[in-house]
Amino acid sequence: MYATNKIEVRSFVNNLYKLNNQINRVNSVRCLASIPTSPNEQQSSNRKVRRRRTTRFSDDLNKGPSFDDFVSGKAKDMLMDPLEQARKDPNARLPAWLKVPIPKGKSFTKIKKDVRDLKLSTVCEEAKCPNIGECWSGGKSGSKKEATATIMLMGDTCTRGCRFCSVKTNRAPAPLDPNEPENTAEAISRWGLGYVVLTTVDRDDLPDGGSHHLKSTVEKIKFKAPEIKVEVLSGDFKGDLEMAKVLATSPLDVFAHNLETVEDLTPFVRDRRATYRQSLAVLNTAKLTNPNLITKTSIMLGFGESDEQIMKTLKDLREINCDVVTFGQYMRPTKRHMKVVEYIRPEKFDYWKETALKLGFLYCASGPLVRSSYKAGESFIENVINKRKEARANLKTSSNSTPTDNAKTSTTTTIESSI
């Protein structure tokens, strides 16, 4: 009897053990919408979830709408951009003085065809310049000698993204075309232009910023057509002044680099890698490397800049002996770009032209439709270059002359110093 009861108890315990294992096995399987049954899970589920504290910036430059402001819709009413705050009329329409005729003419058609055939890019097209019809057609005369084309080298894709520019952007643009210098020189010699502007996208992906590529292009143009005057509108080479020296030692005639706007608005208008002082350093380095170069820059108006800011910019340029400055109206290329703060009247452009000349600039092209490579400035710059070469030739001749030619030598020296 005792043995029988012992066997039954052992059987009961075994069955109880198996049942407990089955229960644990079922509890270990977590299904969707299941409720945790283990003590640890139940304890963790009862704990209060702590929310991560919102990151807050104390820097004035980083102040702006919070995430909650965007969710609630309040962010649209919080204007932190000084350009937006300066805009007087958000619905201002394009003034009559900024409207231009449709591009046409034989010279225009020929230049456009050659650009396509040689697979070149022009900033005239990429930046949607309003003067493309006038510059490519040769102005009122229609002469090819007076036509101006601005070739964009090193591709049509920039590694930077300025808020005013419509050129395509990419962190890793296509590699440089090794045939581009030769093709560019061939196209320019074929057109028979008197003055050509070479501009470039910023190539921060290249170790030298493309300076040697630009230098090679200038050398090939001068070899094929030595009579053509060459202006290079360069980037800032990421602030590497040695690369600026490389370009300045090429046989170009005009070294141009644009400030674009006044110092205070630069962070809001240009790419963060392009600074006002860096641009001044590039122009200054070019002038110091080759004093015979004409240095040139361009400033856009219409961002909400003040007269005091513009005057300070002009004085900064004169301190580094910049020779030429141009003023033009900023015009929004597409709806994806920053809006125009103000449309400047033509009379104001005339005022800044007079002011620049009084400060000592050799030349100033100023008008609503003027751009950095606008043809109105090239005729004067070309004339200055020719005068300088003539003066230097006269100096060499006078150095080999007899003492009786002192009066002539003195006069030539005066001409050289006044140019």
Image: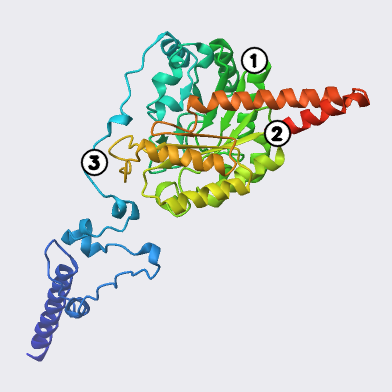
Determine which residue is flagged by label 2: 292
Q: Quadrant of residue 395?
A: top right
Looking at the image, which residue sits at the far right?
403
Using the image, tell me which numbered label, if any, was put on residue 225.
1
- Numbered disc 3: secondary structure: loop
Distance from Cα at disc 1 to Cα at disc 3: 47 Å
Residue 69 seen: yes
Sequence-earlier tag: 1 or 3 = 3
Q: 10 Å neighbourhood of mark 2: few (<14), some, or many (≥20)?
A: some
**403 relative to 380 in the view: left or right:** right
Q: Quadrant of residue 247?
A: top right
Sequence-earlier tag: 3 or 2 = 3
The quadrant in which the C terminus is found is top right
Q: Amino acid at mark 2?
A: Asn
Distance from Cα at disc 1 to Cα at disc 2: 20 Å
Looking at the image, which residue sits at the far bottom?
2
Q: Amino acid at mark 3?
A: Ala
The quadrant in which the N terminus is found is bottom left
**15 relative to 230 in the view: left or right:** left
Q: 10 Å neighbourhood of mark 3: few (<14), some, or many (≥20)?
A: few
Using the image, tell me which numbered label, if any, was put on residue 92.
3
Q: Amino acid at mark 1?
A: Ala
Q: Residue at x 38, y 41 (%)?
A: 164
**371 relative to 386 in the view: left or right:** left
The answer to whether residue 216 is above or below residue 163 is above
Distance from Cα at disc 3 to Cα at disc 2: 44 Å
Using the image, tell me which numbered label, if any, was put on residue 312.
none
